[in-house]
Image (spheres, rainbow, N blue to C red):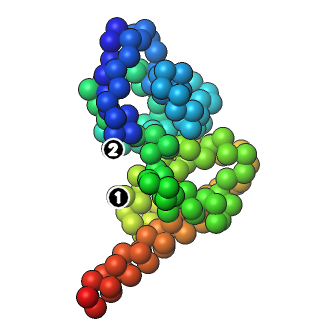
């Protein structure tokens, strides 16, 4: 079957099998290997992408179901050579160890911060509760997301202050 969707801002059309999972479409058909494939059972969350702005586990979505929709992957977080604050936070606070869960964690964290720019530790832990990290114990992931939230808050405050003095 033929499927078309917007992936990271670009329209893509491919011939696929109807049973192809979105995670495999992204990795094998589009070469977007930042989306990891871990379990095929929706337990690990390494495959989280956005479907029409909502985080989904792409191992539970058929590529055909994403037809006509917008998909955003971890590759789209960095814009024009500038890392997203979530990506920076994971670097600054050592939120990644082996890196396997990192793309899904980052996509979930970005969605959380877009909805709630100043989440509590509990809200962060709730947001990532559907994802498994076998390396960090989650403390550094939580710190990374809090770092990103503080960074974005600081950037907003600086922009408002510079606008007020202009």
Point out which mark residue 128 bears.
none
Question: Rounded to the nearest whole Å, what is the CA distance between mark 2 and mark 1?
Answer: 11 Å
Q: How many marks?
A: 2
* Labels 2, 1: front one: 2
What secondary structure is marked by label 2?
A: loop
Evaluate if marks 2 and 1 touch, with contact meaning CB atoms under 8 Å apart.
no
**154 w.r.t. 83: above or below:** below
Q: Residue visible at 62% across and 43% down?
A: 101
Residue 48 appears left or right of 137: left
Residue 43 shows in this picture: no
Point out which mark residue 115 bears.
1
Q: Residue visible at 41% across and 60% down?
A: 113
Q: Residue visible at 57% across and 33% down?
A: 33
Q: Quadrant of residue 117?
A: bottom left
Label 1 Cα neighbours within 10 Å, binned few <14 / some 14-19 / many ≥20:
few
> In the current view of this chain or complex, which residue is farthest to the front?
80
Foreground residue, 107 or 118?
107
Q: Where is residue 59 in the image (x, y as percent from the top left)?
A: 50, 27
Q: Position of residue 127 (x, y in %)?
A: 48, 52
Foreground residue, 120 or 32?
32
Q: Residue visible at 50% across and 43% down?
A: 75
**125 w.r.t. 153: above or below:** above
The image quadrant where one finds the N terminus is top left
Label 2 Cα neighbours within 10 Å, binned few <14 / some 14-19 / many ≥20:
few
Q: Where is residue 29 in the image (x, y as percent from the top left)?
A: 49, 21
The image quadrant where one finds the C terminus is bottom left
> In the current view of this chain or complex, which residue is farthest to the bottom?
165
What secondary structure is marked by label 1?
A: helix
Q: Quadrant of residue 103?
A: top right
Q: In which quarter of the image is residue 34?
A: top right
Point out which mark residue 53 bears.
2
């Amino acid at each position: 079957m033929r499927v078309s969707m917007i992936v990271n801002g670009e329209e893509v059309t491919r011939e696929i099998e109807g049973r192809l999972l979105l995670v495999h479409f992204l990795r094998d058909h589009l070469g977007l290997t930042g989306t990891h494939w871990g379990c095929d059972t929706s337990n690990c969350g390494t495959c989280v992408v956005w479907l029409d702005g909502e985080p989904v586990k792409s191992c539970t979505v058929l590529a055909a179901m994403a037809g006509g929709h917008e998909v955003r992957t971890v590759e789209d977080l960095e814009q024009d050579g500038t890392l997203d604050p979530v990506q920076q936070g994971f670097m600054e606070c050592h939120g990644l160890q082996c890196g396997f869960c990192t793309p899904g964690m980052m996509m979930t964290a970005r969605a959380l911060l877009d909805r709630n720019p100043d989440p509590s530790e509990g809200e962060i832990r709730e947001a990532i509760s559907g994802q498994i990290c076998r390396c960090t114990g989650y403390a550094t992931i939580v710190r990374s997301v809090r770092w990103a939230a503080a960074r974005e808050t600081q950037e907003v405050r600086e922009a408002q202050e510079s606008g007020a003095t202009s």
